Image (cartoon, rainbow, N blue to C red):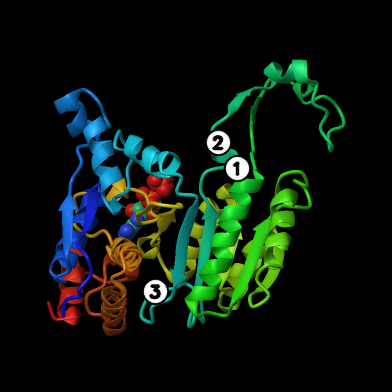
Amino acid sequence: MSETRAGKTITVIEGDDAAPEVVQPTVELIDRMNLPITWEYPLVGEAAKAETGKAFPDASRTMIDEADTTLFGSSSGSSGTALFYLRWGKKTFANVRPCLHFPGCSSPLVNPDGINFVIVRENLEDLYVGVEGQLADLAPLNLVGRTIRKPVHELGEGRFAIKAITREGSERVIRFAFELARTRGGRKLVTSTQKHNMLRGTDGYFLEIAREIATEYPDIDFETFIVDDFACRMIIQPQHFDVIVMPNLYGDILSDSAAGLVGSLGLAASGCYGEDYAYFEPAHGTAPDIAGKGIINPTATLMSARMMLEYLDFGEAAERLQEAVAKVYADGKYLTPDQGGRASTREFCTAVSACLGI
Ligand code: ATP
C-alpha cells in the first residue's frame, strides 16, 4: 500500500565505524515501502576531503538545505562537521528521544511493561555552547562564587566552562514539549528537570520559564523534579512519565540512561527539530568496537526513520514500521546480540521486512 503524498527528498549521511551497517539496510527497507522518496547522498568527511579538499563542501550543504530532511548515521570523524551544521546551522533546538519498551526486549527491569516516555533535550545551549577557558582569565571580572565565597580565579590553576540558558532557547524547547504532550496521546504530562536548587541563576531560570509556559497549557499537567531526584524516579517508576524536558547536558546523559531501562543503546531513536528543519539520527554513537561484524542493532536507526516518516507526513507508513519492529521483538527469533539473540543486523531487518510484507 503506498501513500499519496507529494514526493520528498531525504539526504543520507551514513556516518562512521558501524553506523553505515544500520543506515544502509534502513534506507533499503524504507525504499521498499514504496513511498515517493528520493534519496540523496551529500559528500562529507574523508571522501569529501579527498575529492574537494573540504570535509563539508558547499554543494553538500546546499543539498541538505534543499532536502526535506536528513537521516544521519552516527559520526566519529570528519563527517561530524555536517552534524554541527545540522544542529547549530539549522537551529534544531529540540532533541526528541523516545524511550519505548517493546515486549521481548531484554530490559534489566523486572517490570518494563508500558514504558513509553519521551525526553526532549534542549539541543543548542547549556554547557554545549563551547566556551571554556583558564580560570586565571576570569581575574579581571572578579567573579565571587555564591558557595565558595571568594573570586573563582583564586581557586588556583584550573579551567571553566560557560553554561548558557537563554529565555528564547528555553521557551521554544519547553513549548515544544507541551505541544508534543498534546499530540502524543499519552498521559498529557510534562515534567521538567534541572538542578535548580544549586544552579539558581541558570537552571532556576529554566524552571521559571517552564512554570510560565505551563500556564498556557491548562490541558497538560506539569511537574518538576531536581535532576538527581528525577534520575532515581526514572529508574524506579519509568511508567509514570510522558514528556520530560531538560537542559542539554542532563538530556544527553539521561537519554542514554533511559535507553538502558529498555535494554540497549541500540534501541534509542532520536529526532532533532527546529522551526523549519529536522534531522534524524540514532542516539547511540558509532559503536566502533563492533564495526564490521554485522551485528549492530538497527532498531535505533529504524525507529529514528519511523520519526522521520512521521515528520514527512507518511504517518501510516511510520505506524506500520513501528508495528513491524515490535513484532520482531515479540517473536524473539531474530534479535541481535545486544538483545541476547544471535541474529545479524541484516537478519533483523529481513524479519522486519517480512512483517511489513515487502
Ligand atoms: P558517542 O560518544 O558518540 O555517543 P560512545 O563511544 O560513547 O559514542 P557508542 O558508540 O554509542 O558510545 O557505544 C557504546 C557501547 O554501546 C559500545 O559497546 C557499542 O558497541 C554499544 N552500542 C552502541 N550502539 C549500539 C547498537 N546500535 N547496537 C548494539 N550495540 C551498540
**Sequence-wise first label, 3 or 1:** 3
| Nearer to us in this view, 283 or 32 | 32
At x 26%, y 67%, the residue is 336
- Who's the residue at 16% across and 80% down the image? 1
> Under tag 1, what secondary structure?
loop
Q: Circle 1 sits on which residue?
A: 126
Q: Amino acid at mark 1?
A: Asp
Q: Find out whether the residues at labels 3 and 1 contact each other: C-beta distance under 8 Å.
A: no
Where residue 10 appears, as percent x and y from the top left, is: 23, 54
Which one is nearer the viewer's eye here, 271 or 259?
A: 271
Where, by quadrant of the figure, is residue 271 drawn? bottom left
Q: Residue at x 21, y 50 (%)?
A: 20
Residue 293: horizontal and vertical position, in percent?
A: 19, 54
Q: Of the residues shown, which amino acid type is indicated by label 3?
A: Ser
Q: Secondary structure at mark 3?
A: loop
Q: Which residue is mark 3?
A: 106
Q: Which mark lies nearer to you, 2 or 3?
A: 2
Q: Alpha-carbon neighbours of circle 2 within 10 Å: few (<14), some, or many (≥20)?
A: some
Q: Where does label 2 land, which residue?
A: 129
